[in-house]
Image (spheres, helix red, strand yellow):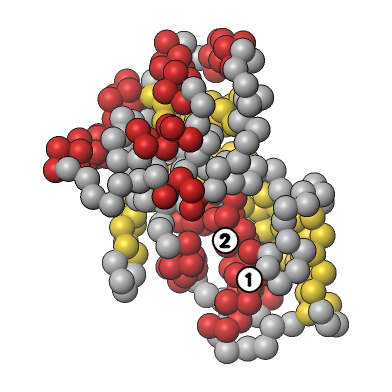
Amino acid sequence: MIKVKVPATTANMGPGFDSIGMALSLYNIVYAEEIERGLEIIIQDGNPHIPKDERNLIYKTIEHFYKVINKPIPGMRIVQQDSIPHTRGLGSSAACIVAGLHIANAMSQSFFSKEELVQMAAQLEGHPDNTTPALLGGMTIGAMNEEDMKYVKVRVPENIHFAVMIPDFTLSTELARSVLPKEVSLKDAVFNASRAGLLAASMITGDVENLSLAMEDCLHEPYRSKLIPHMDEILKTAKIHGAKGAYLSGAGPTLIAVVKNVVAFRREMVEYLAGLENNWQVQMLQVDNEGAKVWINEELRY
């Protein structure tokens, strides 16, 4: 029996569009084992939107891996325990890709290195800011070209807390990308580049006082805010109640605030969000600095 535990991820992180991501302390757990033939997929939370056949993203990733190593894919049983909400901007697709790669790597006894899995995952996802932190933990800053992906992983101080504000509606990445402009001005590019550098340095050092400025963005948030009712108002209110920085997570609709005073912030934001539609929920999370973990027959391997 193979068990994989994969963290949620928050991508884009303010100005870090398609490049900066971080792992969070919210997890999907997937079990897999070989069976004589066929495919069995069990979804333990009963989510009817997750395919239980060959369209399942975990299985599709496993299938891709077996094609890469040129081996026939065995019959298997997959059991998903999902805590990461789907299509909410918290890396649910990346978690499936990472789980699938780890399962295939263990099941086929291929022993691909974590670095090889990082490269494969980024190619499958198309950008590195979800799959890389899901595999490695911490915050990662990555860039891709046609051949490979380069990245730096940094450990984020664990005394920084993240208020994850999740509404009850979904937002597909395809729709969220469709509203973005094809080109941006030099002014906007410089705006984001300066803040992305400041964000990376601030998270490395734990200097959260810079984050109000460092998490500003003008490449995707102004366009995607039209898809998320009250987004700008919620981000401003989060800062009023003490957030050091606040931003749109991934393609949305989840919003995240960086906070120090956890109890007071959560109390104020829960009360405020209760007055809005879309049944917003607030979860207080921390960084996961370790990334995905794999057990084989109950023994932790990596």
Q: Position of residue 114 (x, y in %)?
A: 49, 66
Whether residue 21 is visible, yes or no, is: no
Q: Mark 1: which amino acid?
A: Lys
**In front: mark 1 or mark 2?**
1
Work out whether residue 236 or residue 142 is closer to the camera in this orientation and state it: 236
Q: Is residue 222 left or right of residue 122?
A: left
The N terminus lies in quadrant:
bottom right
Q: Which mark is residue 60?
A: 1
Q: How many residues crowd around disc 1 within 10 Å: few (fewer than 14), some, or many (20 or more)?
A: some
Residue drawn at 17 percent across, 43 percent down: 185
Q: Mark 2: which amino acid?
A: Val
Q: Label 2: which residue?
A: 98
Residue drawn at 57 percent across, 84 percent down: 67
Mark 1, secondary structure of its residue: helix
Q: Which mark is residue 32?
A: none
Whether residue 250 is visible, yes or no, is: yes
**Separation (CA) of disc 1 from disc 2:** 12 Å
